Image (cartoon, rainbow, N blue to C red):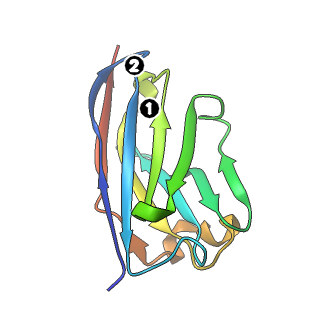
Amino acid sequence: EVQLVESGGGLVQAGGSLRLSCVASGLTFRDYAIGWFRQAPGKERDLLSCISSKDGTYYADSVKGRFAVSSDNAKNTVYLQMNSLKPEDTAVYYCAAGLGPGCPSLVPWENLEVWGQGTLVSVSS
């Protein structure tokens, strides 16, 4: 069974940092891109970042320079280090597996079948 399990969300003050983890089972990072998405109430789900063996890393403009994605293949874990957090970063964050090894396989998100359970990140001003 393919499964993604997230952890690391919480409440933080503006300017603070959090690190999210996404532990994968039943798949290998060599074969699938892993993306980080977020969805705030009343807003669309957006792709923030991707890591893949084929394309390296990708960041949306909204998080470029503040967030960093990495992977530990020995632990089957992808991380999202989030620095300089802003109140507008408040959302539920999800990791998801792409349909293949490249980052473009993560869009549109409606086509993806393997998701983490989501973790809430709240940033206070």
Q: Which mark is residue 89?
A: 1
Q: Nearer the viewer, residue 109 or 26?
A: 26
Marks 1 and 2: CB-CB under 8 Å?
Answer: no
**Residue at the image position 43 percent from the left and 78 percent from the top:** 113
Which residue ends up furthest to the front in the rendered image?
Answer: 74
Residue 71, given in percent of the width and then of the height, sits at 52, 54
Q: Which residue is more in the foreground, 26 or 59?
A: 26
Image coordinates for residue 29, horizontal then vertical, percent: 54, 70
Residue at 60% x, 78% y: name it.
31
**Where is residue 103 shown, x and y percent of the image?**
67, 64
Mark yes or no: residue 45 visible: no
Query: Would you place residue 40 above or below residue 124 in this image?
Result: below
Image side of residue 93 versus residue 109, left or right: left
Q: Quadrant of residue 67?
A: top right
Q: Quadrant where the C terminus lies?
A: top left
Q: Amino acid at mark 2?
A: Gly
Q: Nearer the viewer, residue 97 or 89?
A: 97
Image position, residue 21 (x, y; %): 37, 50
Asked whether residue 116 is in view, the answer is yes
Side of 61 where 36 appears, left or right: left
How busy is the neighbourhood of tag 1: few (under 14 within 10 Å), some, or many (20 plus)? Answer: many
Q: Which amino acid type is shown beneath numbered disc 1? A: Asp
Q: Residue under label 2, please give it.
A: 16
Q: Is residue 44 above or below residue 5?
A: above
Counting residues from the start of the chain, the first of labels 1 and 2 encountered is: 2
- Judge from the rendering whether residue 103 lies leftward or rightward of residue 80; answer left or right: right
Residue 57: image tag? none
Q: Residue at x 67, y 66 (%)?
A: 53
Picture layout, residue 27 above or below residue 21 = below
